[in-house]
Image (cartoon, rainbow, N blue to C red):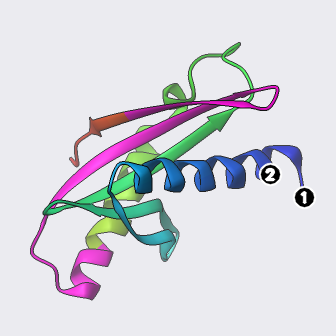
Amino acid sequence: MAQHNQLGKEGETAACNFLIEKDYKIVERNYRHRRNEVDIIAMYENELIAVEVKSRSSTYFGNPEDFITATQIQSIVKAIDAYIQKKDLDVEVRFDVISIIKINNDLNIEHIENAFYSF
């Protein structure tokens, strides 16, 4: 497995553990609808949270969250909309980002709530 793929998987696992420690309930990981994907779908209180996880090994080119494109946001929104329809849910939705920087063996995790809105 390529090193960046391994870091991505490690980042998603760390993000799930981080959310669980904050009393979020993980509902799905890597939910796909057609070509669209949400890294983590969680429930917190009465909100459905779509979480995009971005992991990097340095900030040389910028912070991990800086690499989320408008196209990615549209993809996440489409996937979460499909999930809501499939499960017939009536909930508020929030879009968060978990930014992870791994330096040596240390993970610096930042949780950005309401990182973006659907458009």
Q: Which residue is mark 1?
A: 1
Q: Nearer the viewer, residue 83 or 51?
A: 51
Q: Residue at x 36, y 52 (%)?
A: 74
Can you say whether 72 is above or below 92 in the image? Answer: above
Q: Is residue 86 above or below residue 119?
A: below
Q: From which residue to which does the magenta span run? A: 82-111
Residue occupying image coordinates x 52% and y 46%: 53
Find out whether the residues at labels 2 and 1 contact each other: C-beta distance under 8 Å: yes
Q: Position of residue 44 (x, y in %)?
A: 24, 58
Looking at the rendered structure, the kind of residue marked 1 is Met
Residue type at the position of mark 2 = Gln
The mark found on residue 6 in the picture is 2
**Distance of label 2 from label 1 (alpha carbons):** 7 Å
> Disc 2 or 1, which lies upstream in sequence?
1
SS state under label 2 = helix
Residue 90 on image: x %, y %: 9, 75
Residue 67: % across, % down: 55, 31
> What is the chief secondary structure element of the magenta stretch?
strand
Q: Nearer the viewer, residue 47 or 23?
A: 23
